[in-house]
Each structure stands twice: as C-alpha cells, then as structure tokens.
Image (tube, helix red, strand yellow):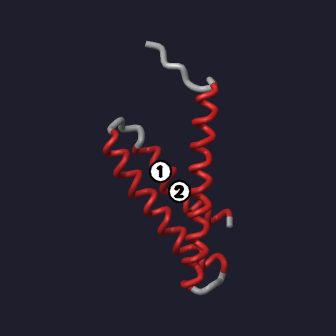
C-alpha cells in the first residue's frame, strides 16, 4: 500500500521542479498533466495491489479518489475558517 501511494504521488512531487519557473499557465498545464497521470497510476495499480479483477478495481480506485477529493475540500474549508478567525497570512504593503 505504501509503495502504491509513493508511485501515485510521484508525478505531483515532480511538479515542484516545474514550480520553480514562475509562470502560472505553465504550472497549471504541467500540474493538470501530473494529476491526470497520478490518477492513471492509481487506476492501474490498485487492482494489481488488491489482486482483484479490473472492473472491481475501477470501483475501488474511484472510491479512493472520491475520499481524497472530499478530504481536500474539507481541508480547504478548515483553512477558510481558520483564516477568517484571524490566524493567517498578513499582507503589508
């Protein structure tokens, strides 16, 4: 499981190399490609890891992806709540 998580997250980690170039459109395009490849690796690797048929693997991978997206939205909501309380970045001009 840890190996699958590491292989799946590797394209997103490599995105940090491209993020050194400060162009928003390049970062967005490469980020979209990295996330798409990470999802592809998840869909291909999960049935092999769990030793289940490909059609059931699609359902399991979709469930894993859905839980990850729900956790991401929850993290964004918590960040908004914490920043609205006053704990957050302060921009001084």
Number of other residues with Cα within 10 Å of mark 2, as a class: few under 14, some 14 to 19, many 20 or more = some
Residue on which disc 1 sits = 14
How far from the left and from the top, in percent, is residue 34? 43, 56
Decide: is 75 above or below 22: below
Which residue is at 37% across, 47% downward? Answer: 28
From the viewer's side, name the closer residue of 65 and 13.
65
Please tell me whether mark 1 sits on a helix, a strand or a loop: helix
Q: Dot 1: few (<14), some (14–19), or many (≥20) neighbours within 10 Å?
A: few
Q: Quadrant of residue 80?
A: top right
Q: Is residue 22 above or below residue 74?
A: above
Residue at mark 2 to residue at mark 1: CA–CA distance? 6 Å
Residue 88: % across, % down = 59, 26
Examine the image and state in which quarter residue 64 appears: bottom right
Residue 59 occupies quadrant: bottom right
Is 9 above or below relative to 93?
below
> Which residue does the image show at 61% across and 74% down from the upper left?
60
Q: Nearer the viewer, residue 59 or 43?
A: 59
Q: Residue at x 46, y 57 (%)?
A: 35
Q: Left of 52 or right of it: where is 58? A: left
* 2 and 1 marks in contact (CB < 8 Å): yes
Residue 54 is situated, as x and y percent measured from the top left of the image, at 55, 84
- The residue that mark 2 highlights is 10
Residue occupying the far top of the picture:
93
Mark 2, secondary structure of its residue: helix
| Total count of labels | 2
| Rendered location of residue 30, percent (x, y) | 37, 52
Q: Is residue 83 above or below residue 61?
A: above
Looking at the figure, which quarter contains the N terminus?
Answer: bottom right
- Identified at 60% across, 79% down, the residue is 48
Q: Which mark is residue 62?
A: none
């Amino acid at each position: 499981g840890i190996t699958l998580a590491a292989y799946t997250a590797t394209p997103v980690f490599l995105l940090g190399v491209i993020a050194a170039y400060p162009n928003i459109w390049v970062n967005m395009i490469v980020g979209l490609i990295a996330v798409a490849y990470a999802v592809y690796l998840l869909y291909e690797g999960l049935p092999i890891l769990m030793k289940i048929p490909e059609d059931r693997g699609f359902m399991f991978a979709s469930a894993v992806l859905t839980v990850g997206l729900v956790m991401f939205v929850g993290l964004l909501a918590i960040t908004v709540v914490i920043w609205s309380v006053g704990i957050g970045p302060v921009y001084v001009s």
